[in-house]
Image (cartoon, rainbow, N blue to C red):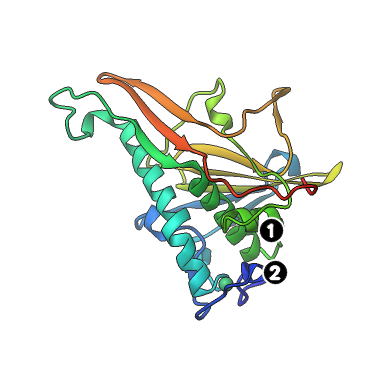
């Protein structure tokens, strides 16, 4: 795949011009942005860095881009807001009167669509073709095989939140030499790390847990929870998984 072509074109439904779209949802960052693309531990020490100049590319048509704006981008923005609130619960309205935090909800499916969409953007911008499973998940179409969403930072490790020094979004493409069909990527948003893969991934010898239902943190006002809704996922086509 290359620039100048909508990467969702194989799904049909293209409309409007292909104009310079942001590789990463623009509203997620202000003026300060540092994006890092690393190829991950499976591929050695290579590191690809995307500079802010590379953040716009002709890779999606207007209609496909708009569809993702209403769903995927919206969920990523909402989650980013929740993560900010989780980091600084005493700045929330109501904290001064010691009101306990209410559960924050976000669509896990639409966040998954954002992860897949942003991965596809990075792949195309770097001259590579994303796995069709990720293209189809991004647009909520029936899948040729399962897509797994792992949250490794929440299994025993301390959840590390973004601060002024951290990149807002960090992306890495992972491949395994022994298994050419394995295709995975890592992405972090606001310090929340995810690994998305078409196969099982092990960490420290254990399978990682697929799909996070909730993350929580004890605050002076009580337990603060972010709840992910994974209902309404795109189906996996029978006999192909
Ligand atoms: Zn299109």
Q: Position of residue 156 (x, y in %)?
A: 55, 20
Q: Residues within 10 Å of mark 1 (few under 14, many from 20)?
A: some
Name the one closer to the observer, 60 or 133: 133
Task: Identify the disc placed on residue 130.
Answer: 1
Q: Which residue is mark 2?
A: 1
Task: Identify the disc placed on residue 188.
Answer: none
Q: CA distance from mark 1 to mark 2?
A: 8 Å
Where, by quadrant of the figure, is residue 204 drawn? Answer: top right
- The residue at 23%/28% (across/down) is 90
- The residue at 18%/28% (across/down) is 95
Given the current orientation, which residue lies at the most extreme left position?
97
Name the one closer to the observer, 32 or 69: 69
Q: Quadrant of ligand 1?
A: bottom right
Q: Are marks 1 and 2 in contact (CB under 8 Å)?
A: yes
Q: Residues within 10 Å of mark 2 (few under 14, many from 20)?
A: some
Name the one closer to the observer, 5 or 241: 241
Q: Earlier in the sequence, mark 1 or mark 2?
A: 2
- The residue at 54%/30% (across/down) is 153
Q: Position of residue 192 (x, y in %)?
A: 48, 37
14 to the left or right of 215? right
């Amino acid at each position: 795949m290359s620039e100048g072509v909508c990467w969702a074109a194989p799904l049909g439904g293209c409309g409007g011009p292909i104009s310079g779209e942001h590789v990463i949802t623009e509203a997620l960052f202000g003026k300060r942005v540092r994006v890092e693309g690393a190829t991950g531990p499976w591929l050695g020490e290579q590191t690809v860095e995307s500079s802010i100049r590379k953040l716009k590319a002709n890779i999606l048509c207007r209609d496909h881009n708009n569809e993702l704006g209403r769903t995927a981008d919206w969920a990523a923005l909402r989650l980013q807001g929740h993560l900010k609130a989780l980091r600084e619960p005493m700045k929330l309205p109501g904290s001064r009167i010691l009101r306990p935090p209410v559960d924050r909800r976000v669509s896990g499916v639409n966040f998954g669509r954002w992860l897949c969409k942003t991965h596809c953007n990075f792949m195309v911008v770097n001259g590579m073709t994303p796995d069709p499973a990720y293209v189809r998940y991004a647009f909520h179409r029936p899948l040729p095989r399962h897509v797994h969403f792992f949250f490794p930072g929440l299994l025993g490790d301390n959840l590390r939140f973004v601060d002024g020094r951290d990149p807002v979004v960090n992306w890495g493409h992972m491949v395994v030499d022994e298994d050419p069909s394995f295709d995975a990527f890592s992405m972090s948003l606001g310090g929340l790390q995810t690994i998305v893969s078409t196969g099982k991934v092990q960490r420290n010898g254990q399978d990682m847990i697929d799909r996070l239902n909730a993350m929580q943190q004890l605050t002076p006002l009580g337990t603060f929870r972010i709840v992910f809704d994974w209902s309404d996922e795109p189906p996996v086509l029978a006999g192909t998984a």
